[in-house]
Image (cartoon, coloured by chain):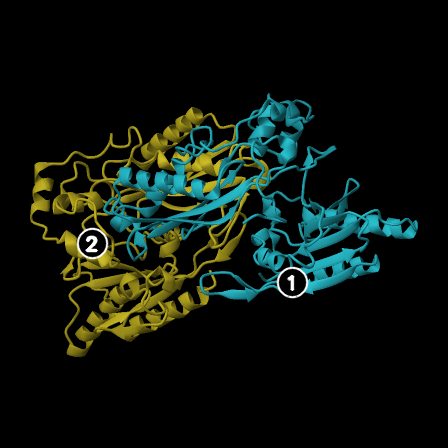
Chain colours: A yellow, B cyan
């Protein structure tokens, strides 16, 4: 939130760089952003830019973002993440890969065409935003409002926020898993209590919450929610055969991620499928309970767990919501806790399949996101 | 930490008030406090004071603290917790009950004796500190260093930081449960990962941690750690009979705590025993994972769970540590996660029994804490 000024600076820098290679640009003010309950803040505008306007050429829409998630040196950075340094011939800093570097590549390409006096073979429309890491609030609205103007006549989209398979192999993303985000809150009493005085005498909300979060996955960390696998598009022989030719080194991926082991380490096909065509569930954080260092002996009177499920064709967000909510409500009944429980679901995005992967059903694939 | 100045102001205020009723006072500088790893800060001094020095009288040592835990209006306060207001004939504000009000009572009592020109029937030694809520760091050292001077010749101790049973009944505390504090940390890789890219492909530390925290208690929230009940002093008929005469209204307690239900609501003896003579386990917070509002789609690369067990006679902290550590290590093996797990234990305090409660073994009960 406090870095909004830096985001604006960066947007203006990119705008200038795009103008220098001949683009027509526009900074589109979007609406206010919901921050906390009842609190709103003006969000950074979205930068739209066009180079080329030749109706005989195809038009490509390029998406990129210049904001980043927060980072601290404690997260495992070798140097201050917000000061770019050159290390082993690479530029290292927060956002160099995700996603400022890739945006810069487009600008360099256009500059090269310009300098060589070679006409660019396509028209390009850029959508550069500064709200990606907080759910692209406002982007949908902008796209809808300009669907007959800026966003019309687009032949292809390129989300320039992808990744490489390992360190040596660029990766073309043909589809993206969707997202169903949930919070589950357990509310006990009105006060935070002292565990010395009341531990053992009350039903602790955090005990309840941990029980429920634990029931979402099995011992292996895989989803354990009844019904959730029902709608997944069956694997076709064509799709399966595609995976056989994808060259990937799971040991290299393991090393790059710095984890002791990746899932399906000895089967690269299963490994890729676990990332690309199977749903997964991650727990992201716990709200309303202390997360700072030090000794706390309190019994929190409420606790909010945050988790999300990455969904794949043909899973429908609404159905996923139903399975998750039903399951959590049943679980809470089993526990017979007198506390209150609330499940909230938001930030739904359908998966973005591409026919190339052989998914049985191709969904309407709007620009950016479908919901 | 930023309120250290207020703590000092309060200590000086109390010192002046005690001097006004004839006490000899001393502000004892204690050592620096460990805050975070590698960070220390000077801690507020401990105020020692003596009134009366008559060797024919008994000497009482009174303990109190003037610091408070943090509080926010969101925790359920009707008005700003740090601005004292009068409501329904009561003075409301953070620390009025715990523990500034009770300290003030002693000063008022001494003032009354003074004004009525009646000699105080006992000598009183005061120990007033400003570090209670962060584990009384430095207090032990001070007590040991002054055991042959200030802390010698004490006949009774009164910890003036007690509570009432409900709203109408003051409560004399004859013993205190001890505390065994633990952190359990699960460490995966070196980086925080994006759940869209890697959800399903890695073993998530938070999944592991939640599994382990959930295994500490049963469906009812009661301790489920093998062996932990082994050493608990058996109930004697005398002890059991004492509970029969304690008048307490569990419904009133429920209402005051603002919880939907207290444990053993229909059996006041069981309710009191669950708070006084049975161990309990509370989970206090989760470190290293997001706890702020908003949508996070990260996979935290590490997570630290904090929990503590309130222990009772004849449980020994070292044995409790062994049971907990052994259990967590076995659990982690069952889970077969490739992540690393670390159990740390600290802040041990033995229970403080009093023979009055009939515990089978009376432990050495030093001033303040025994460890």
Quadrant into which the C terminus of chain A falls? top left
Q: Residue at x 91, y 48 (%)?
A: B118
Residue A175 left/right relative to A318:
left
Return the x and y of residue B289 as percentages of the image width and height: 40, 51
Return the x and y of residue B179 as percentages of the image width and height: 52, 43
Q: Residue at x 15, y 66 (%)?
A: A121
Judging by the rendered image, the residue that carries numbered circle 2 is A254
- Tag 2 secondary structure: helix
Viewer-nearest of discs 1 and 2: 1
Q: Circle 1: is it few (<14), some (14-19), or many (20+) Cα within 10 Å?
A: many
* Figure disc tally: 2
**Above or below A240: residue B18:** below
Q: For the residues marked 1 and 2, what is the alpha-carbon distance in whole angstroms? A: 51 Å
Judging by the rendered image, the residue that carries numbered circle 1 is B45
State the residue in front, A317 or A309.
Answer: A309
Residue B221 left/right relative to A94:
right
Return the x and y of residue B204 as percentages of the image width and height: 30, 46
Return the x and y of residue A19 as percentages of the image width and height: 31, 72
Residue placed furthest toward the front = B56
Residue B107 left/right relative to A245:
right
């Amino acid at each position: 939130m406090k870095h909004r000024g830096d985001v604006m600076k960066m947007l203006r820098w990119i705008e200038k760089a795009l103008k220098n290679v001949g683009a027509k640009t526009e900074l589109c003010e979007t609406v206010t952003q919901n921050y906390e309950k009842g609190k709103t803040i003006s969000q950074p505008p979205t930068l739209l830019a066009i180079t080329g306007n030749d109706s005989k050429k195809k038009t490509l829409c390029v998406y990129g973002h210049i904001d980043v998630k927060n980072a601290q040196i404690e997260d495992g950075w070798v140097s201050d993440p917000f000061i770019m340094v050159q290390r082993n011939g690479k530029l290292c800093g927060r956002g160099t890969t995700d996603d400022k570097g890739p945006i810069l590549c487009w600008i360099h390409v256009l500059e090269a065409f310009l300098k060589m006096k070679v006409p660019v073979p396509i028209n390009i429309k850029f959508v550069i935003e500064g709200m990606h890491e907080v759910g692209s609030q406002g982007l949908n609205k902008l796209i809808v409002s300009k669907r007959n103007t800026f966003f019309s006549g687009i032949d292809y989209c390129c989300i320039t926020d992808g990744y490489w398979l390992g360190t040596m192999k660029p990766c073309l993303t043909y589809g993206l898993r969707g997202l169903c985000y949930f919070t589950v809150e357990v509310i006990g009493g009105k006060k935070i209590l002292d565990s010395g005085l009341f531990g053992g005498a009350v039903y602790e909300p955090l005990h309840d919450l941990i029980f429920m979060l634990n029931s979402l996955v099995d011992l292996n960390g895989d989803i354990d929610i009844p019904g959730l696998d029902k709608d997944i598009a069956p694997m076709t022989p064509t799709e399966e055969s595609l995976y056989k030719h994808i060259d990937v080194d799971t040991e290299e991926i393991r090393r790059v991620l710095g984890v002791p082991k990746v899932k399906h380490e000895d089967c690269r096909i299963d490994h890729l499928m676990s990332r690309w065509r199977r749903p997964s569930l991650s727990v992201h954080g716990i709200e309303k309970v202390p997360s700072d260092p030090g000794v706390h002996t309190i019994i929190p009177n409420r606790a909010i767990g945050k988790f999300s499920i990455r969904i794949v064709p043909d899973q429908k967000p609404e159905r996923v919501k139903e399975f998750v909510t039903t399951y959590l409500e049943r679980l809470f009944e089993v526990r017979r806790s007198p506390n209150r429980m609330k499940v909230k679901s938001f930030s739904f995005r359908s998966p973005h399949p591409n026919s190339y992967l052989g998914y049985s059903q191709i969904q309407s694939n709007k620009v950016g996101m479908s919901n």
